[in-house]
Amino acid sequence: MIRNFLARMRAPEPPLQLYEAIVAQARQPVFYTDFAVADDVEGRFEMIVMHLVLVLDRMQQLGDEGRAAGQSLFNLFFRDMDRSLREMGTGDLVVPKRIRKMAENVYGRADVYRAALAAEDMVALASAVERNVRPAAPGAAEGLARYMSENCRALRSHDFDALAQGRIDWVTPATMASA
C-alpha cells in the first residue's frame, strides 16, 4: 500500500508539452490538403493516433522513465478524447462506450503500424494507412507511410528530455506527398 502511494508520488506529470506537439503536428494543413485526409473528426483522430503511435514507440525504447511518461501521454490522450466527446454533446452514458471503442482502435492501429515499421514493410504500412486514414488523393497512403517511416527513424535521435519538453524535429510532410 505504501509502495503504491510512493510510486504514484514519483509518477511523472502528464507530458502536456509533448501531447501538444503531437496534436500541433497532426493538425498541419498539408495532411488535409496534399494528402487529402478528411478534415473532420475521424480524419483528425487518425492523424493524432498516427503521431501518437510514433512517439509512444520511441518512449518505449527509453527505459522505465520513457515507458512511464509514455503511459502518462496515453492517459492524457484519452482524457482529451473524453473531453472532446463531451464538448461535442456526447451523453455521459455513451462516453465510456465510445472511449472503449477508441482504445480498441488505437491498440489495433498501434500493433499494425509498429509491426510494419519494425519490418520496414512499406507495402503493409501503406495498406494500414489506406485502411485506417483513408486519404483521398492518389498515392497519399504511400506518402503517409513514407512520412511515418522517416519520422520513426528521426525519432530515434530524440532523447527523453527533448521528448518530455515536446521538442520534436518532425520530418516535413510536404516532401512525402510529392515523392
Image (cartoon, rainbow, N blue to C red):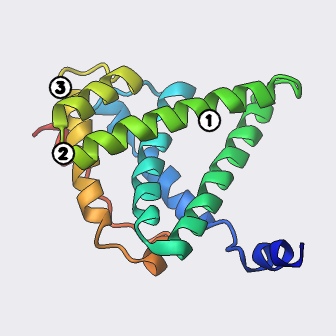
State which mark lies toward you, 2 or 3: 2
Instruction: Please tell me which of labels 1 and 2 falls first in the chain.
Output: 1
> Looking at the image, which residue is at 26% across and 37% down?
144
Q: Residue at x 32, y 28 (%)?
A: 128
Q: Is the residue marked by circle 3 packed among few (<14), some (14-19), or many (20+) residues within 10 Å?
A: some
Above or below, 173 against 85 in this view is below
The quadrant in which residue 139 appears is top left
**Alpha-carbon span between mark 1 and mark 2:** 25 Å
Q: Is residue 167 left or right of residue 151?
A: right
Rendered position, 113 above or below 73? above
Residue in view at x 43 percent, y 72 percent: 62
Residue to which mark 1 is pinned: 103
Coordinates of residue 102 in the picture (x, y in percent): 62, 31
Residue linked to disc 2: 120
Q: Judging from the image, what secondary structure is the residue with disc 3 in?
A: loop
Residue type at mark 3: give it. Answer: Gly
**Whole-number angstrom distance, CA of label 2 to CA of label 3:** 18 Å
**Residue annotated with mark 3:** 139
Return the x and y of residue 67 as percentages of the image width and height: 54, 66
Specify which label sits upstream in the sequence, 2 or 3: 2
| Amino acid type, residue under disc 1 in the picture | Ala
Q: With respect to residue 144, does 135 lie above or below?
A: above
**Left-right relation of 112 to 80:** left
Disc 2 + disc 3, Cβ < 8 Å: no
Nearer-the-camera pick, 26 or 15: 15
